Image (cartoon, rainbow, N blue to C red):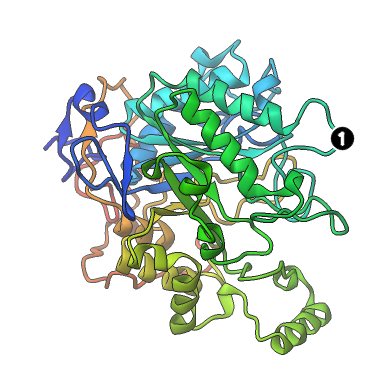
Amino acid sequence: FEAHPYCLLRRRISMEEWRRQFPLRAQGCRLLNQFGQHFKLAGVNWYGASDSFHVVGGLDARPLSELCHAVAAMGFTVVRLPFSSEMLRVERVPPGAIDYVQNKDLEGLSPLQVYDRVIEELGAAGVTVIINNHTTVGAWSGGVELNGMWFRDQCRVYTEHSWIDDWVMMAKRYEDHPEVIGYDIRNEVRPTSMMGPSPRWGNSSPVYDWSRAAGSCARALMDANAPGLVVVERIAWPQNSLREMLNPKPPWEAWQVPRDRIVLAVHMYAWSGPGAWSPKHFMPGVLRSFFDVVDYVGSRSLYGEMSQEALEEQMDKDFGFCIDEDICPVWLSELGCSLDTELDWFTKVCQYLDKKDVDFAYWPLNVGPKPGGSDDEAYGILTNDWQPRWADPRLQALRRLCPQAVLPSPKKAQTRRPLHLPARARADSGSLSPFHLNVTPNVTPVASPSCFGQVDEPLWGAPF
């Protein structure tokens, strides 16, 4: 055991040995490494390359290597790394996205080359990567908008064919990077307009059939000898049980691809729920009351409105049966919450994830203003200067779900400025029950010790 604060209680091995465990393969509902050991996807989303700046967030605040080692310090085994199709074609990083004083080696690189460096640095820190085609055009993605599909109607650049070609290119680009363990082929497939066509799984209209398109992409990756897992998300709206994706045939049979290469994925937030999209979480008083009545008549609830028992029953129906019946791996590749009204819901979900040992990825790592807007990211788990916020109850809960990972020995660290631990972070957390989240409302984020800093005692909630 080494004395670095970010690797206490973690066994260290050589980088070569760490990389030999990949690629991963599915056996039933679990992912196994090349030694037959369970590899848990305990992850975090790090966005930015899918947005208007075309590079991950935080590069304007800290050195890339520090950010990547902080991810390892927090206990995560994988980063879901979104990118846009546009990013692959952009030649220059927009001004202000990177502080080149702190990241001098990134100067002059294209966004895709910066993406390469992020993957390399994460791998060097002992963190795997699942790359994710999050958007078509680099922009904040959510709701009914033009990034809802894997292609753009009446566009000669962003076609389904080019989307598949992009995936084959990316798989070949990282085929010699064992830390790239998978390809999340598209984020939250959903309608692109309120009145336009909706994607369906097995739609009679082949153009909008997500099953057909995902299968074409999966087969193209197999034909290109891509070594990673293929992650396929359920359609975002309407949000149905994964049984829809498994009937009448499971996708690996329908697509004629190896069963051990397919992972199904779902997203969950307090403001989302089963079935059609409901905007009521974001509505003011009178309008919210109207949607409350509509949902009451339809016997429908958002995930955040459900009791513990009802939420667990719904998660069993949505995806938990795949684990209980040992059908296939399921990755809850997005879940997140704010520190106010959603924390109770998050605690309920974490209890379920712990009970069933579910693979997950928290959304997001990022803090500060969202790309292209002025609103701050309310779900982020870092301080405002992009360092781990150890006292954050969300991070504490997530770390309890993370495995005792085996990490590669780090490269010799540069001399870093020491950061001292705030006194209030030195309390003993040993008395906390597994998911008792002790949160003080409106806590102001404070700087926490750098993963390269020196501390004179173990810190509360510090890395294992």
In the figure, is residue 38 to the left or right of 274?
left
Left or right relative to 234: residue 147 = right
Q: Is residue 402 left or right of residue 238?
A: left
Q: Which residue is painted at 69% across and 40% down in the image?
A: 150
**What residue is shown at x 84% (from left), y 31% (from top)?**
155
Residue 381 % position (x, y): 47, 51
Label 1 amino acid?
Gln
Q: Is residue 382 visible?
A: no
The residue sitting at 53% across, 16% down in the picture is 106
Residue pushed farthest left?
1
Residue 445 place in picture, x, y as percent: 49, 53
Confirm whether residue 129 shows in the render: yes
Q: Is residue 118 above or below residue 216?
A: above
- Label 1: which secondary element: loop
Q: Residue 31: image x %, image y %?
A: 31, 47
Q: Which residue is mark 1?
A: 154
The residue closer to the viewer here, 216 or 13, is 216
**Pick the front one: 446 or 6:** 6
Quadrant in the picture for residue 282: bottom right
Query: Vertically, is 221 above or below 405?
Result: above
Question: The N terminus lies in which quarter of the figure?
Answer: top left
